Amino acid sequence: MLLVDVQETVWPAEVKLVYSQIERAGELPAHHQKRLRHHINRMWLEQMPVPSIVDAAKSLAIIMEKYA
């Protein structure tokens, strides 16, 4: 589930806003960056509160760094 295959897409502004709050997300390999945005978008669509999305995305980014 964490390593879903994500195609190129245009991300909503909300995803970009949350993504910009994740330290070092831009240092992840491109495929992990896409996956992180995918997970942020999924959480947004599930109407999770933004602070919870940010916390979850930070945790995912840390995990993804280990697999970079």
Image: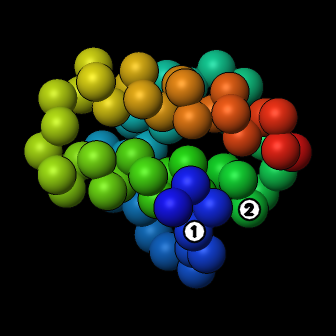
Answer left or right for 8 relative to 37: right
Q: Earlier in the sequence, mark 2 or mark 1?
A: 1
Element type where label 1 sits in the image: loop
- Residue 31, by quadrant, is bottom right
Q: Tell me which residue sits at (12%, 45%) in the image.
A: 47
Q: Is residue 26 among what the camera can see?
A: no
Q: Secondary structure at mark 2?
A: helix
How crowded is the residue under tag 1: few (<14 C-alpha within 10 Å), some, or many (20+)? few
Question: Looking at the picture, how far across and down is residue 19, in whole percent?
Answer: 49, 37
Colour scheme in the image? rainbow
The residue furthest bottom is 7
Q: Amino acid at mark 1?
A: Val
| Looking at the image, residue 38 lies above or below residue 10 | above
Q: Is residue 21 visible?
A: yes
Q: Answer with left or right where residue 10 lies relative to residue 31.
A: left
Residue bearing mark 2? 31
The residues tagged by marks 2 and 1 sit, at their Cα atoms, a distance apart of 10 Å
Query: Relative to 13, is 21 above or below?
Result: above
Which image quarter is the C terminus in? top right
- Residue 40 got which mark? none
Residue 32 lies, with reference to residue 24, above or below; the image says below
* Residue occupying the point 16% across, 52% down: 46
Q: Is residue 67 left or right of residue 26?
A: right
Q: Nearer the viewer, mark 2 or mark 1?
A: 1
Query: On the image, which quarter does residue 18 sit in?
Result: top left
Coordinates of residue 21 in the picture (x, y in percent): 49, 23
Amino acid type at circle 2 is His
* Residue at the (28%, 24%) spot, across then down: 52
Which residue is label 1 attached to?
A: 4
Residue 11 pos. (x, y %):
42, 61
